[in-house]
Image (spheres, grey):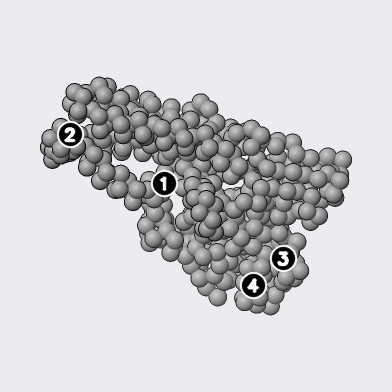
């Protein structure tokens, strides 16, 4: 049985960084099965987790000085909460890993400590029927496991309550930005083509000069929607994310058209402002998928309001941007 | 989580107190602490904090809780895809997260 350490190596840290910026994130997994930390014995507790390497590392790094078994379920490299939502982190899969490892011959007790986030997918009462082990829900966060074990396997309210601190929000930003490089490249190409259209049919000079203005506006919109909005989330007024994005986008857009670009005319400035607002609003709205407090019903509700506004904003930007060289 | 509030009245969450046996599993597993067991029955004490994760419904032994069963982490890209799939009459496929 593989024994693993509780300190992460340079390679583990690099792997974490790669996953956090979205490089081969869907392949960052370990083999499912039974592992251990410390000097395990038959009476040592069994902690269950997912086979996303980031989840596994987040768990073991908190187990310094603890002797425990770690049972890794096959969630196809997805973290506990998302896998529970998708149904891959479930009682059937955990029971399968219990049987494959022959856990009943290895430990003297019949108890599995499940991450509370797994409750979305695991009905603990089903575990008993399927494999003879009783599932109890540990804390939400791995960092609370030592305290949970010391407390006689009792979780207090803070251990059971989800948080969304500045650090927890900022760590999600790189992947949000990395995941949109394809549409971003497509948008840039379109912007450079559109920017060249004018009274001379097509001007390479205008394409580069105006295109650069539009490209920087797009970068700013992404920063406003996917970085500033998550970072400042609790302090931006409003509850709907598309509205928060409109606010950050409107301010960023004002700063850009009045501070950053002297070469553009008034119509172009209006166009870029609309574009920044629409794109920032969309990026902010997309961040709902990464938060631990937005309901699917709520997101659908706000999208039915936000998406039309974003489309109108983008259409206005398009019309102004194409019309500008003909009018001025 | 009292410092983050989302749209009030949006979540689909129903508790059948008649069926409830007061085991308290919902109160244990909810990451937003919206249930409390009072007089041997579960009660929803903070409905608007519900994010529809479904942990309570999954762990209720008597199926007294109903939560929006639609799958999805709620990112806009996935929802747009699922809307498009519904319009085209194709099965809804998941996102990459």
Mark 2–mark 4 Cα distance, whole angstroms, equals 65 Å
**Residue B83: x, y in percent?**
52, 48
Mark 3–mark 1 Cα distance, whole angstroms, equals 36 Å
**Residue B26: x, y in percent?**
74, 48
Q: Quadrant of residue A272?
A: top left
Query: What numbered label is drawn on residue A121?
Result: none
**Residue A37: x, y in percent?**
55, 65
- The N terminus of chain A appears in which quarter of the rendering? bottom right
Give the mark toward the camera: 3 or 1: 1
Looking at the picture, tell me which residue is in the foreground, A45 or A313: A313
Left/right placement of residue A182 relative to residue A199 reads right
Name the residue tied to disc 3.
Answer: A127
Query: What numbered label is drawn on residue A176?
Result: 1
SS assignment at label 1: helix
Query: What numbered label is drawn on residue A198?
Result: 2
Q: Which circle's residue, 3 or 2, is located before the other in the chain? A: 3
Mark 3–mark 4 Cα distance, whole angstroms, equals 10 Å
Q: Which circle's residue, 4 or 1, is located before the other in the chain? A: 4
């Amino acid at each position: 049985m593989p024994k693993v350490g509780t300190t992460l190596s340079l390679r583990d840290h690099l792997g974490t960084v790669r996953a956090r910026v979205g490089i081969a994130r869907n392949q960052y997994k370990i083999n499912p099965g039974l592992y251990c930390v410390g000097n395990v014995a038959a009476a040592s507790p069994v902690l269950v987790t997912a086979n996303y390497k980031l989840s596994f590392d987040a768990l073991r790094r908190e187990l310094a000085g603890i002797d425990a078994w770690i049972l890794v379920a096959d969630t196809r490299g997805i973290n506990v909460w998302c896998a529970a939502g998708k149904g891959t982190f479930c009682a059937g899969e955990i029971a399968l890993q219990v049987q494959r490892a022959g856990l009943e011959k290895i430990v003297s007790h019949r108890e599995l400590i499940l991450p509370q986030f797994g409750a979305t997918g695991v009905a603990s009462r089903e575990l008993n029927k399927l494999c003879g082990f009783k599932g109890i829900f540990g804390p939400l966060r791995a960092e609370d496991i030592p305290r949970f074990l010391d407390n006689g396997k009792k979780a207090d309210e803070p251990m059971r309550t989800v948080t969304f601190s500045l650090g927890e929000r900022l760590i999600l930003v790189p992947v949000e930005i990395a995941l949109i490089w394809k549409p971003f490249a497509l948008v840039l190409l379109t912007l450079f083509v559109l920017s060249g259209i004018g009274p001379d049919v097509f001007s390479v000079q205008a394409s580069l000069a105006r295109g650069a203005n539009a490209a920087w506006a797009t970068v700013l919109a992404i920063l406003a929607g996917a970085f500033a909005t998550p970072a400042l989330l609790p302090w931006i007024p409003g509850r709907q994310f598309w509205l928060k994005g409109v606010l950050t986008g409107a301010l960023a857009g004002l700063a850009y058209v009045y501070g950053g670009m002297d070469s553009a005319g008034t119509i172009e400035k209006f166009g870029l402002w609309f574009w920044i607002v629409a794109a920032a609003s969309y990026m902010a709205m997309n961040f709902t998928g990464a938060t631990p407090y937005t309901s699917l019903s709520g997101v659908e509700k706000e999208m039915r309001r936000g998406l039309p506004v974003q489309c109108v904003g983008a259409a206005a930007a398009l019309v102004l941007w194409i019309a500008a060289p003909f009018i001025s | 989580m009292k410092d983050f509030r989302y749209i009030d009245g949006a979540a689909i969450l129903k508790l059948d107190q008649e069926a409830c046996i007061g085991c308290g599993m919902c109160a244990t597993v909810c990451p937003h602490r919206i249930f409390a067991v009072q007089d041997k029955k579960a009660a929803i004490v903070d409905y608007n904090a519900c994010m529809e994760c479904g942990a309570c419904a999954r762990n209720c032994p008597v199926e007294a809780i109903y939560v929006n069963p639609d799958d999805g982490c709620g990112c806009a890209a996935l929802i747009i895809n699922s809307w498009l799939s519904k319009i085209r009459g194709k099965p809804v496929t998941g996102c990459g997260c």
